[in-house]
Image: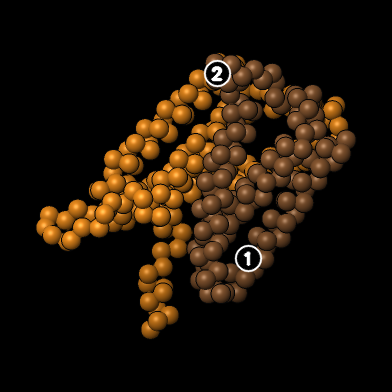
Amino acid sequence: MLGMRHTYLWFAQLVTGALIAMFLGIHMVIMHLEDILGFFGVEIHEPTSWGSMIERAGKGSWLAFYILFLAFVLYHGLNGLRGILLELTPSAKVERIINWAIIALGIIAFALGTYVPVALFQG
Amino acid sequence: MARRQVKENYLGWRGWVWAGRYQAERYLYLLHRITGLGLVLYLMLHLCVMTVFRIQGQDVYETIMRLFDNPVFKAGEYLIFAAFIYHALNGLRLILQELGFILGKPTPPVYPYKDSLRKKRPIVLAMIAVVLIFVLVVLFDFVNGGF
């Protein structure tokens, strides 16, 4: 099983990549493309304003969206970064250090990134 | 001997920028890597900003958002958007390629050979065209919204 580890990690990289294309696509269109959304009849006013942000933060569906999104993005980004860093050295010892550093960074970032949306959701 | 072989085939960081005998795809790969690193860096900054300042309430949040509301940051946001478009579409191409959907049926190696890079060249060009269209549409929206 352990020998297949890289295959599973890489497959997860592909799956999260495809999911992020959708999640980040939605995020970017809502946050930046007001004119194009308006063309299709969707009116969003100042999505980055406090009021608009609080309105989204109160909805369970957005909370789930952002937590899933964060998990996919952190996995994909940090596993990608890990792959690049591991090309720097063939040393197994350095590989272990990089792996644990990446896992620690991911856990810290996930904890930080979920804390605020959950706190805002609870009010 | 085995150890020396590893050294000889090991390009190190030079392999990041030098395509050698490889074709155009190697430079798409390089751009995929650069945009990927840029997006990870932005993700970390974005997470820090949205965590540290948002939890302090409306006043701090609005002050920091006003700080970002200038042409330099808007241009930066546009670059992030463009990097995302390229990384997503090139990534989609790589997924389809890796799973074998766009490589075509295997053919017997009869002269004149047609390698897989040449077979999928139209798909690569189509991907680049779609990236350019999206990048221009988003540029239009950014400029229209007032830089």
Q: Quadrant of the C terminus of chain A?
A: top right
Query: Which percent across, then down, holds residue A120?
Result: 83, 37
In the displayed structure, does residue B34 sit left or right of residue B44?
left
Residue on which disc 2 sits? A40
Badge 2 amino acid: Phe
Q: In the image shown, does A104 or B107 lie closer to the viewer?
A: B107
Query: Which percent across, then down, holds residue B27?
Result: 38, 47
Badge 1 amino acid: Asn
Q: Residue at x 41, y 64 (%)?
A: B11
Please state the chain letter of the residue tagged with numbered disc 1 in the rendered image.
Answer: A
Query: Which percent across, then down, holds residue B111?
Result: 11, 58
Q: Nearer the viewer, mark 2 or mark 1?
A: 2
Which SS class for mark 1? helix
- Chain coloured orange: which letter? B
In this rendering, the answer to whether A79 lies above or below B43 is below
In this rendering, the answer to whether B9 lies above or below A110 is below
Please check whether the numbered discs 2 and 1 fall on a single chain: yes
Residue on which disc 1 sits? A99
- Chain coloured brown: which letter? A
Which SS class for mark 2? loop
Q: Residue at x 70, y 24 (%)?
A: A47
Q: How many marks?
A: 2
